[in-house]
Amino acid sequence: MARTIIYLDVDGVINAIRNGTPSQKRTGFKDFRRTTVNGFQIQYAQELIDWLNSISEIDGVEIKWLTTWQEDAPKNLCPAIGLFGWDWEVLGGDLTDWGGPHWWKYKAIREDHSKHKPDLAIWIDDDLKLEVRAHSWALETMNVMAVIPDALDGLTRDALDGITAAIEASK
């Protein structure tokens, strides 16, 4: 059985940071909700949460947190938005290492990818567009898919369809 690991960020991915509700035309989602977690407004599409919950239950698919939220993602965010990610592994690092070859997320994903050697790795992070070296690694590494949402809207229906297709094709 093929093994897929999804490396998941929060802000700009699950949390659409647009001031105002993202449009259904841009995102493909009509049911955006708002809540406050750790003092931050979280704006998310219920359809996205439902998709993440269902995709995480597919045999051979594992989701790992790769976010500055660190342990707060499973501990505080998940119960607030109904996401079943409380037991997903949290990849960490020195959050002060930001940018370039020392970006903590870049280091964490390379180490995890090298250790676990998934058939397909999907890195979902809006900050990849700013990190040339990390983005290049994702593009150049066999069986790694980079998904870079617009931070204002977060993941879209089209992105979910592309991720689902990639998972199906890797089986």
Image: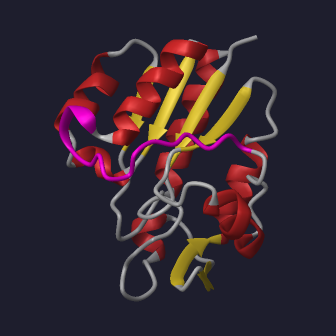
| Horizontal side, residue 118 vs residue 86: left or right | left
Which residue is rendered at x = 51% and y = 45% of the image? 66
Q: Is residue 91 magenta?
A: yes
Looking at the rendered image, the quarter that the N terminus falls into is top right
Which residue is rendered at x = 45% and y = 64% of the image? 11
| Horizontal side, residue 1 vs residue 147: left or right | right
Looking at the rendered image, the quarter that the C terminus falls into is top right
- Which sits in the foreground, 26 or 66? 66
- What's the magenta bit mostly, secondary-structure-wise? loop
Which residue is rendered at x = 51% and y = 84% of the image? 41
Q: Is residue 33 above or below residue 50?
A: below
Q: In this view of the protein, can residue 119 be seen by the observer?
A: no
Which residue is rendered at x = 69% and y = 13% of the image? 2
- Which sits in the foreground, 42 or 37? 37
Q: In this view of the protein, can residue 104 be seen by the observer?
A: yes
Q: Is residue 124 magenta?
A: no
Q: Is residue 84 above or below residue 1?
A: below
Q: Which stretch is magenta?
A: 88-102
Q: Is residue 86 above or below residue 99?
A: below
Q: Residue 131's x, y, as percent? A: 22, 42
Q: Residue 152's x, y, as percent? A: 35, 71
Q: Residue 23's x, y, as percent? A: 43, 78
Q: Residue 34's x, y, as percent? A: 59, 85
Q: Is residue 3 above or below residue 149?
A: above
